[in-house]
Amino acid sequence: MKHLFLKAASALLIAMSLCSCSDDNDDPRPIIDPVDPGRPAGAYLLNQGSYYSNIAGSIGYLDYPSQTLTDSIFYTLNGILPGNTLQCGLFYGSRFYFIAYESNALFVCDHLLHLQKIVKTDHPRALAADGGHLYISNYDGHVFKLDTLSLEVADTVAVGPNPEEMAIAGGYLYVANSDGLNYANNYADGKSVSKIRLSTFTLEKNIPVGLNPTRMAADSDGNVYVIASGDYGSTPSVLQKIDPSDHVTDIAQATMMTLSLDTIYAVNSVTDWTTYETSNSYFSISTRSLERNDHLVSEGVEWPIMIAVDPVSRHLFLSSFTTGAYGASYNTSGYLKEYTPSGTPLRTYTTGVNPVQLVFTP
C-alpha cells in the first residue's frame, strides 16, 4: 500500500509540472525539461520551521504552470518529516540535497524529491558542490567533503568556529566563520573567511573580514561576496567583496543577498528592537561596474527572510514572516512574494513556517 501511495504522489507531482501555462505568458521558463520530461518545472521552498516551538520543517513546491505553492511535498512523497531546522538545499547531478541543522542530517533525494538516503552530519549549516563532491559546513568547525557516488565522507578540514555559507571560485572553497554561538562575547572569533584549496582539500589561509560573516556567493570573475552580519545592534551588517588576490572591500550595508548573472540582489533589513519597527531597503548592484539600483521592487515585504532570482525568467522572490503582537511572528505561516524582473508584484503565496530558501529546478 505504501508503494502505491508513493507512486500516486509521484504521478501527481509530475502531472502538476505538465499543466498549461497561464495566458499572461509572463514567465519564459519551459513547462517541462526537454531532456527529462518527468522533472518538475518550478522550485522547492525550504521552510525552516521552529525548533523551540516544536514545529518541524517542511518543503513546499512552487509550480509555475498552475501558479500554486503546495507545502509538505516531501512528507507527502516519503511519509516522513524532513527534519528540524532546514538550512540549505541544492541540485547537483541527478540529485537534490538538503540539510536539517537540529536533526544532524543530510537528505539525499532524486529530482522529484523521493528520498534515497540520509547521511549523518554534525549540525550542518550550508552546502556547495563541485567536481563530483558535495561540501557541507558543520557548526562544529569542520567542512565535510562527500563523494556523490558513494555518498560517503571522503575527507574533512577544520576551519573557523561555527562556519556558515560557502562559495567556490578559482579552485578554492571559501567558508564564512561566524563564531555564531559566541554571541555573548560579541562573536570574538567570527572575523574571517577560510580559503580551502580544492585540489588538496587543505586550508590555505584565513582572510580577515567583518564581524560575524554568514552569507556568501561568487561571481563569474572569481570574486567572492560575503555578508558580515555584525552584532545585530551597534555594528551594522555589511556586504564585502573578496577579489582573487584576497583583497577585501566594503560595498554596501546589506543583511541578505543572492547573486545571479553577475548582479547582486540584496536586502538591508534593520530592526529597532525598542520599538519593533523595521526599515527595509531593496537594491541590486552590478558586479562588473558596481552600479547600484535602489528601485529593485515597487512594494516590499514585512519581515524579509530571503531573496531569490529565477535564473531563467529573472523573476524576483522575497519571503517574509507575517507580523505578530511583537514584531515578526516566528511560529505561524509566512509568505512568498513574486515579482516581474522590473520589480512589479505578481503573486503572493502562503508558505510554511520560516521560508528560508527557494531552490529552482535546473
Image (cartoon, grey):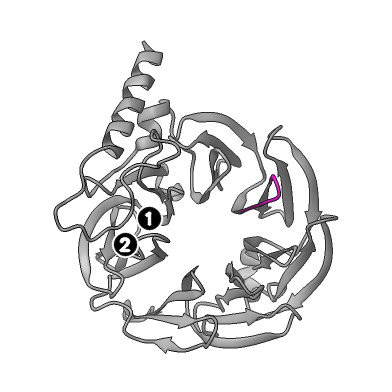
The amino acid sitting under disc 1 is: Asn
How far apart, in angstroms, are the residues tagged by discs 2 and 1?
7 Å
Note whether 57 is above or below 205 in the view shown: above
Residue at (38% x, 55% y) in the render: 355
Q: Is residue 95 visible?
A: yes
Decide if residue 132 is on the left or right side of residue 62. right
Q: Give the label on residue 253, or none.
A: none
- Observer-nearest residue: 199 or 306? 199
- Dominant secondary structure, magenta: strand
Farthest left residue in view: 23
Q: SS at mark 1?
A: loop
Q: Is residue 234 visible?
A: no
The residue where tag 2 is placed is: 321
**The N terminus: image quadrant:** top left
Residue 300 occupies which quadrant of the picture? bottom left
Residue at (44% x, 29% y) in the render: 80
Q: Which residues are magenta?
A: 128-132
- Observer-nearest residue: 122 or 116? 116
Decide if residue 23 is on the left or right side of residue 8. left
Q: SS at mark 2?
A: strand
- Observer-nearest residue: 83 or 194? 194
The amino acid sitting under disc 2 is: Phe
The residue where tag 1 is placed is: 354
Percent x, y of residue 226:
60, 74
Q: Residues within 10 Å of mark 1 (few under 14, many from 20)?
A: many
Percent x, y of residue 38:
39, 33
